Amino acid sequence: MQVTNSYSSNVHMSCWRKIDLAPHYFEKSILGTASRIIRRINSTIHGGISFGGEKSTLTPKRERENLMANTLLVFNRNPYDGTDITWNGLRLADQLLSVGLEVNIFLMNDSVDLARDAATPPEGYFDLGKMLKELIGRSVCVKVCGTCKVRCGLHKGKPYFEGAQEAKMTELAQWIKEADKVISF
């Protein structure tokens, strides 16, 4: 059977069938390519880059060094400011430890009160200082801005409790450089 169209005066019907199916072949080709890309991404995430079924020797730095992933939590707010932001951050730190991540905490601005025994919770509220001490007891490294000690918080100039290390911005910068994830509260 012959068909006439504007592109050609004589096109066989079988050609039209092939052309008509072309979008389906094209979709399969795109889906196949997308599937291959996703497999490569998953392979990268789970230990190497896949090229044609072979595993590359390229692996993430932490995996090469057999280290846990490192998460840095940076707190800025007064711990008892009427919100649950600090409380939720400390709860997240606890959960990150529970799933096997290394957690570091840096306190700056008004959040430095969190590392002071002088800061007490309002009636009926969680003792955030106690929560922080429990995290320190679970090997969480807590550093507190030294400059903020005299400038920030409701209890300016009061000492930090044991386990909270006074630190400088250079130490925060180094922690940020080394961290796999940085979360700010």
Image (spheres, rainbow, N blue to C red):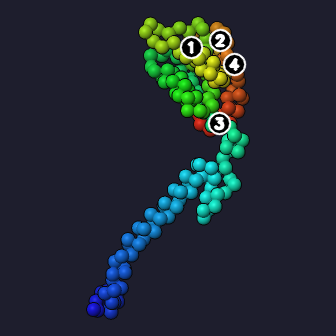
Cα–Cα gap, marks 1 and 4 = 14 Å
Cα–Cα gap, marks 3 and 1 = 26 Å
Measured along the vertical axis of the image, is residue 33 above or below residue 152?
below
Q: Which residue is mark 4?
A: 165
Residue 121 vs residue 181: left or right? left
- For label 4, the crowd category at 10 Å Cα-Cα, with few meaning under 14, some 14 to 19 and many 20 or more, is some
Circles 1 and 2, Cβ within 8 Å, touching? The answer is: yes
Q: Which residue is mark 3?
A: 68
Measured along the vertical axis of the image, is residue 173 above or below residue 37?
above
Q: Quadrant of residue 13?
A: bottom left
**How many badges with numbers are in the image?**
4
- For label 1, the crowd category at 10 Å Cα-Cα, with few meaning under 14, some 14 to 19 and many 20 or more, is many
* Three-letter amino acid code of the residue under disc 3: Met
Residue 163 vs residue 184: left or right? right
Percent coordinates x, y for residue 160 in the rendering: 65, 12
Residue shown at 55% from the left, 32% from the top: 99
* Three-letter amino acid code of the residue under disc 1: Gly
Judging depth in this view, the residue of 76 and 24 nearest the camera is 24
Closest to the camera, between mark 3 and mark 2, is 3
Sequence order check: which comes first, mark 3 or mark 1? 3
Q: Which residue is mark 2?
A: 161
